[in-house]
Image: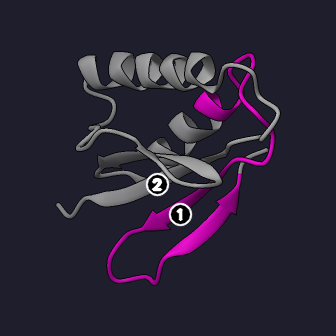
Amino acid sequence: MPHAVVELHIPRPTDDPDPDEWAEEIESFLADLEEIGEIEVPADPETRAAVHVFYLTGPDPDMLLAACAQAAALPGVPRGAYAVVTAEPAPPRRVSLS
């Protein structure tokens, strides 16, 4: 069964005093889901100029999007999160989460 790839994009506010705190919360949340077999986290998150990007894979894009929505709703996570879903044969699509 083909795997979908979802990128979770969380904006990095310029006035955030401790962006590592909420990023670590997301990493921990995703690691817990990976541990129970709900998702796979194939790579470390990336820090880009304006966003943190977390990568998720699995056979069910809807489950991956649900995990992204839950991560985006964690306390302290900046608003404006979105996911980019890539699931062959469909073209990539952007989904707003907050």
Q: Which residues are magenta?
A: 70-96
Q: Which sits earlier in the primary sequence, circle 1 or circle 2?
A: 2
- Amino acid type, label 2: Glu
Q: Position of residue 38 (x, y in %)?
A: 33, 30
Q: Does dot 2 land on a helix, a strand or a loop?
A: strand
Kindly indicate whether the residue at mark 2 contacts the one at mark 1 (C-beta within 8 angstroms): yes
Say which quarter of the image contains residue 10.
top right
Q: Nearer the viewer, residue 29 or 20?
A: 20
Using the rendered view, name the quadrant where residue 43 is placed: top left
Where is mark 2, residue-wise?
7
Crowding near pointer 2: few (<14 within 10 Å), some, many (20+)?
Answer: many
Tell whether 82 sits left or right of 33. Answer: right
Residue at point 67% right, 19% down? 18
Give neighbour class at mark 1: few <14, some 14-19, many 20+ (Cα, 10 Å).
Answer: some
For this view, does 81 lie left or right of residue 56? right
Q: Which mark is residue 61?
A: none
Residue to which mark 1 is pinned:
84
